[in-house]
Amino acid sequence: MRVALAAALCALAGAAWSAEFKVELEVPRLSVAEYHAPYVAFWVRHDESGAVTPLGLWYDDQEKWLKDLRLWWRRTGRGQSDPYDGLTGATRRPGQHSVDFSELPALADLPEGDYQLVVEAAREVGGREVVRLPFHWPADQAATVDASGDQELGRVRLRTAP
């Protein structure tokens, strides 16, 4: 009996921890004279409290350009230090990209509520763009939310599931 109870509790804990939170995004190909891959920041904003949880950051070794991600910089970036919290990686060239934030401890710690996934992109000698995708956390059913940028970002898709 105790073994069955322990197994059930472990399964429940594993299920809570393995909630799906995946982001797909398109970095569009732009016809410009001097192209630089965009820096991209991902974070979650709680609708009610305004609290921000950083998820990830794509940038190269030129940290001086991080301030061009103005919204990210003001909300969370300037208060962090290298290595930046969450998932960091190199900038991405034009094309389709996906990132799985499902295993980040920061997501497991989020209180229940309504949130926005915020994706901000900025390019050196280029533009800046912010896309917001609303979602409820923790997910009680599978959901997909799409949004599109106008120039620096193409389609952005968030997939959540319990």
Image (cartoon, grey):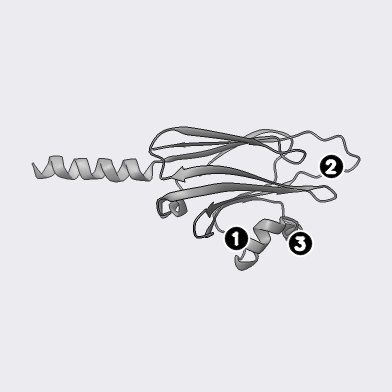
In the image, what residue type sits under mark 1?
Pro
Q: Which residue is the site of mark 2?
A: 35
Could you tell me which quadrant the C terminus lies in?
top left
Q: Which residue is the site of mark 1?
A: 83
Work out how far the residue at label 1 is from the one at label 3, CA to CA, in angstroms. 14 Å
Q: Secondary structure at mark 1?
A: loop
**Chain-order first, disc 2 or disc 3:** 2
State the residue at coordinates (47%, 48%): 114
- 94 in relation to 119, above or below: above
Work out how far the residue at label 2 is from the one at label 3, CA to CA, in angstroms. 18 Å
In the image, what residue type sits under mark 3?
Lys
- 33 in relation to 81, above or below: above
Work out how far the residue at label 2 is from the one at label 1, CA to CA, in angstroms. 26 Å
**Chain-order first, disc 1 or disc 3:** 3
Q: Which residue is the site of mark 3?
A: 64
**Chain-order first, disc 2 or disc 1:** 2
User: Relative to the observer, which residue lies in front, 62 or 42?
Assistant: 42
